[in-house]
Amino acid sequence: MPRTLYEKLWDAHVVAEAGDKALLYIDRHLLHEVSTPQSFQALREDGLQVRRPDTQLAVADHSVPTHDRGGAIADPQAAAQIALLERNCAHFGIEYIALVGENQGIVHVIGPEQGFTLPGITLVCGDSHTSTHGAFGALAFGVGASECGTVMATQTLWQAKTRTLRVTFTGKLQPGVSAKDMALAFIGIVGASGATGYAVEYAGEAVEALSMEGRMTLCNMTIEAGARTGLVAPDGKTFAYLHGRSRAPQGLAWEQAVAAWRALPSDADAKFDREIVIDASEIAPQVTFGTSPDQVMPIGGSLPGGDKLAKAMRYMDVHAGDLIEGLGIDHAFIGSCTNGRIEDLRSAAAVIRGGHVAPGVRALVVPGSMRVKAQAEAEGLDTLFTQAGFEWREPGCSLCVAMNDDRLPPGARCASTSNRNFEGRQGVGARTHLMSPAMVAAAAIAGRIVDVREVLA
Amino acid sequence: MKAMSQVTGQAISLPDADIDTDIIYPARFLLITEKKGLGRYAFADRRDSPDFPIREDEDRPILVAGPNFGCGSSREQAPWAIGDLGIRVIIAESFGDIFANNCFRNGMLPIRLAPAEVEAVRASAENGATITVDLVSRTITGAGTAIPFTVPESQRETLLNGWNDTTRILALHAEDVTAFEAVQQCAAPWLWTTRK
């Protein structure tokens, strides 16, 4: 029987079945400081060990400061949380990536860039944006802290098989439009809970044309439509990205692996439970206007109204009938597991063109990892950014989650490449407009939300 | 995990759609590395509003929420904090998937109902009626309503028995896991060589 990519990944990991669930083998587990203290505590309370420490990799990202790396961490709670992760990893034999090392970064950036993430595997992390890794054709999904503990102790999780949804992007993207716009457009169409209970597979010409960075952005945002898993079939680009990465297989093992990975894509006649087709050539740069990622519109549009949006629009201080274009901002953020990769920084830098961050705007560029930072610096992007008035920071989640000292004041309005425009996400009372890196850079320079296609024209 | 068979009490109505886990448990409190006593931080940025329905000294064990409750972040602090307020059952049209999983893992029951049924329970809640959620018979009763609900059988069994997933897998499936690993080592040997 023809099978989808999701079904192939599922079938290859079933350890046992019972009624409505299967016990799935988990090949890889990424850990960070926020979702694991209680997982380790549960292991201690139950007197358990980590079954396969070699399949686990830990790094601090959420609460780490993005300045003065290597110095003392000012916030005692953050310092204690990060130190606790390091201690827990030492105790249970798990590799911990040092905060000051060349490999540190956001968990969803470093997994792929080190070849820890591979096609055909199951991968979990106590973080909803674990869907990112599906860009490699891995069955990757976010779990809670309790489930992290179960994975560490048993290398398995009970899971219910989900339905499948294929999202086909036909045609080619316009210049100035990116994977982030595809993701936001999809979420706008399907809704914030529209894909709940589905595993999403992205397909079509525009998806095939995306770089691995773009595919990661697309899969990353899948959870914002409610689905825990987003997938792209592995292809030549996937293999080329991974080849030679430090943790990826080498030599004969590499050849064996690639041969197996070539069989992963959905069979031509595989049936999906639901299909959505989106014309990529029709997608304009997207901007969110509300407090849920599905409250999104194309840059040229005017703001909608209605009772259902009233509360969100009051919080955002935006009004029905107004244009989103031209709305003034006072903060800009480029970074996060959604858009903190080298291609994102390149696309933002390409918009600067000798311009300078507008007066009254504070703009942060936070690379997704030390390797991204080093690459950007080798290309001179840091100089471009700093000369244009952007702050060039150390890697971390930063203003995407506002757990470290990067927090916005009440009423601040931020153009942001992050993934959530929830109330208070970037600071109590702060207002977030999600958009692509190029759109954020353009907004930072203009001091207001603009159409990046006109800047680039 | 605390077992559950029946929960009786008054219900809180929180009808807003898309209450994400950042609203339930704001990120700045994620720096706390404990799981107990988090109720004081639940809905921290909404508590000050006079019309916000959840109190700090809450004694109502049922929450009737809006659609897509618990969407967003996977933080398990969201159910820990709600559970710490004494809430054990959440009724809504839909839930964030990870949040719903996390509830089950902590002896809490998320119940999905059709919109009209949610509104019927909400009406009872707003009238201050005493509501009973019975996991054995899978019915919600109170104030003249009797609404059947479904819940995945494996989750129901786990809740009724208060099972710990981790120790139960180790007790019942250790051989299955070992057998799976033996097969995978042959089929995908590249997953079994550690590289840095």
Image (cartoon, coloured by chain):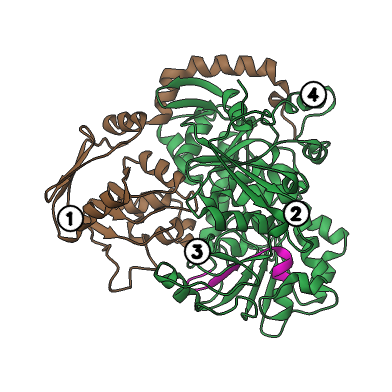
At a point 60% along the width and 18% down the height, the residue shown is B181
Specify the colour of chain B: brown
Mark 1 lies on residue = B124
Q: Nearer the viewer, mark 1 or mark 3?
A: 1
Q: Nearer the viewer, mark 3 or mark 4?
A: 3
Contact flag, marks 3 and 4 (Cβ < 8 Å): no
Dot 1: element: helix
Dot 4: element: helix
Mark 4 lies on residue = A253
Q: Residues within 10 Å of mark 4 (few under 14, many from 20)?
A: some
Instruction: Give the magenta part as a residue range.
Output: A427-441
In the image, residue A435 lies in the stretch drawn in magenta: yes
Vertical placement of residue A396 versus B1, above or below: below
Mark 2 lies on residue = A370
Q: Quadrant of the C terminus of chain B?
A: top right
Please check whether the numbered discs 3 and 4 fall on a single chain: yes
Q: Nearer the viewer, mark 1 or mark 4?
A: 1
Q: Residue A403 vs residue B47: left or right?
A: right
Dot 3: element: loop
For marks 3 and 2 on the same chain, the one whose residue lies earlier in the sequence = 2
At a point 59% along the width and 58% down the height, the residue shown is A419
Please check whether the numbered discs 4 and 2 fall on a single chain: yes
Dot 2: element: helix
Cα separation between marks 2 and 1: 55 Å
Asked if one can make out residue A395 in the rendered structure from this viewpoint, the answer is no
Q: Chain of mark 4?
A: A
Q: Chain of mark 3?
A: A
Contact flag, marks 3 and 2 (Cβ < 8 Å): no
> Foreground: B126 or A151?
B126
